[in-house]
């Protein structure tokens, strides 16, 4: 392990003037790193989890009745794409979990959610609105247009990306994040861990639910 200099705060990465050149280089660098991660042999890391959707379980455990999430979860189950190849997945690959210096990508950090899964999951997750940090016009991490990023990933990986699967995983990512925000808020409300930041995530959940429903609507209208 070694020390690596860089900035990880998402809003700074997408806005600091001194990182303008880095933002130009980052999309291709990120696509290349994802391709390398997804090329790692799975046999040596067979101990990694291969998680399934647990949204219903979390809602039930909280006794929560959230119609928007119930609808979105049911939609995801009914529209799940065919299973693709299984690779190593970073699990939280996004702006905010990368160290960035003036030359671009310096390191990929925060590997605690690494698991085995479909690489489309990683691509959809990166495109979630929350990870654009206000630069909504650039769907891939607030740094690039989604299609440009996917083509770059295809170039480095040699794999064809199913756009509809990426969209499905983006919706799933929003649903999961909305549920997680509720569980974090519950930690505060239950008295387990009194924390204003945890409490505020309950409000964020509503915004993320709306984003999931917006994506579902646009998908059904053929707008994505």
Image: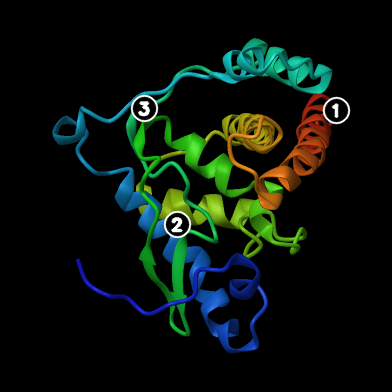
Left or right of 110, for residue 221? right
Left or right of 65, for residue 45? left
Q: Which of the 4 quarters of the picture holds residue 210?
A: top right
Q: Which residue is mark 2?
A: 31
Q: Which residue is mark 3?
A: 85
Residue shown at the point (36%, 24%) measured from the top left: 50
Q: Quadrant of the C terminus?
A: top right
User: Residue 221 shows which numbered tag?
Assistant: 1
Residue 26 is situated, as x and y percent measured from the top left of the image, at 50, 69
Residue shown at the point (52%, 43%) measured from the top left: 123
Earlier in the chain: of badge 2 and badge 3, it is: 2
Given contact means CB atoms under 8 Å apart, are the residues at marks 2 and 3 in contact? no
Residue shown at the point (65%, 44%) measured from the top left: 194
Pick whichever, 186 or 117, lies toward us.
Answer: 186
Distance of label 2 from label 1 (alpha carbons): 29 Å
Q: Is residue 92 above or below residue 9?
A: above
Earlier in the chain: of badge 2 and badge 1, it is: 2
Earlier in the chain: of badge 3 and badge 1, it is: 3
Callout 2 secondary element:
helix
Tell me if mark 3 has few (under 14), some (14-19) or many (20+) residues whose alpha carbon lies within 10 angstroms of its own: few
Q: Which of the 4 quarters of the picture holds residue 177?
A: top right
Callout 3 secondary element:
loop
Pick whichever, 155 or 69, lies toward us.
Answer: 69
Residue 202 is situated, as x and y percent measured from the top left of the image, at 75, 38
């Amino acid at each position: 392990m070694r020390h690596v200099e860089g900035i990880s705060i998402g809003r700074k990465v997408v806005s600091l003037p001194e990182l303008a050149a880095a933002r130009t280089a980052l999309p291709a660098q990120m696509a290349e790193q994802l391709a390398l991660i997804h090329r790692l042999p799975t046999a040596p890391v067979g101990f990694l989890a291969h998680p399934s959707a647990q949204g219903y379980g979390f809602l039930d455990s909280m006794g929560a009745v959230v119609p928007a999430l119930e609808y979105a979860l049911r939609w995801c189950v009914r529209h799940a794409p065919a299973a693709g190849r299984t690779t190593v997945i970073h699990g939280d690959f996004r702006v905010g979990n990368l160290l960035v210096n003036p030359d671009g990508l310096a390191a990929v950090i925060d590997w605690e959610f690494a698991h085995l899964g479909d690489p489309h999951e990683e691509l959809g997750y990166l495109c979630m609105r929350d990870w654009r940090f206000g630069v909504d016009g650039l769907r891939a991490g607030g740094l690039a247009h989604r299609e440009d990023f996917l083509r770059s990933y295809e170039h480095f990986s040699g794999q064809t990306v199913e756009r509809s699967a990426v969209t499905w995983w983006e919706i799933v990512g929003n649903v999961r994040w909305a549920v997680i925000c509720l569980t974090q808020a519950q930690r505060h409300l239950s008295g387990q861990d009194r924390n204003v930041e945890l409490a505020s995530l309950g409000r964020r959940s509503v915004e993320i639910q709306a984003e999931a429903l917006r994506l579902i609507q646009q998908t059904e209208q053929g707008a994505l």
